[in-house]
Amino acid sequence: MSPEVVEILSAEELRRTVTRLASQVVERSDLSKLVLLGIYTRGVNLAEVLARQIEALEGVVVPLGAIDITFYRDDLDSIGIRTPAKTDIPFDLSGKTVVLVDDVIFKGRTIRAALNAVNDYGRPEVIRLVVLVDRGHRELPIHPDFIGKQLPTAKEEQVRVYLQDIDGHDGVELIRV
């Protein structure tokens, strides 16, 4: 039996969702202190899209960084060996409003690892979390500040986010196996 694929967000719906998320981040942030940190892999590209949208809305260039959390994970034995990406944080995080950006939140373990990693790069004034899709099933007490789409899923289902810069098109799909 082949998996069933359900479109959750079309390219247009994804664009509107990112615009809303960017507006929400702007409303709750002092732009002079704001930095975006994308979590590899798709969180980095999503952070870039958010940064472009904030610039379009406010005329402000938001500092952008990328963080790899491979060595901070507590589940490497279950996810297999990965080649780490290069963390790129070209600014001091101390005193900043750091907005972590990821595509999907599930159990919360990636975000826990990202929080640990951020602490190695400074002491932000506040850390907030933007996710495109929140699929529930948290194992840790972590909740995003900004959510593009709440999507209750079964544990065995998968959510795939497609971004133009990586995949050649935008959208979100639910894969039922």
Image (spheres, grey):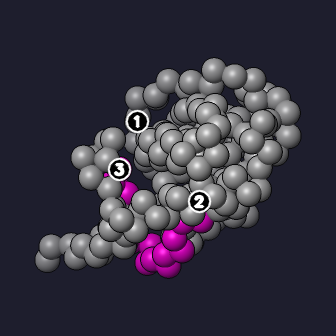
Question: Which numbered marker is on residue 141?
Answer: none
Near-viewer residue (84 or 7): 7
- Residue, x 78% and y 37% (percent of image)? 33
Confirm whether the magenta stretch covers residue 146.
no
In the rendered picture of this protein, how many numbered marks are placed on residues?
3
Circle nearer the viewer, 1 or 2 = 2
Residue 57, compared with residue 148, is above or below; it is above
Alpha-carbon distance for marks 1 and 2? 33 Å
Q: Is residue 10 left or right of residue 89?
A: left
Give the residue furthest to the left.
1
Q: Which mark is residue 21?
A: 2
Q: Quick check: is 162 in the magenta stretch?
A: yes
Amino acid type, mark 2: Leu
Instruction: Point out the tag, 2 or 3, that comes first from the N-terminus.
Output: 2
- The stretch of residues the image draws in magenta is 147-163
Q: Which residue is mark 1?
A: 81
Of callouts 1 and 2, the N-terminal one: 2
Q: Which quarter of the figure is the C terminus placed in?
A: bottom left
Left or right: where does residue 10 sit relative to residue 103?
A: left
Amino acid type for the residue under numbered disc 3: Leu
Measure the alpha-carbon separation of dots 1 and 3. Answer: 24 Å
| Image location of residue 126, percent across then percent down | 82, 45
> Residue 98 is drawn in which quadrant?
top right
Mark 3 highlights which residue? 163
The image position of residue 65, as x and y in percent, is 59, 31
Q: Secondary structure at mark 3?
A: loop
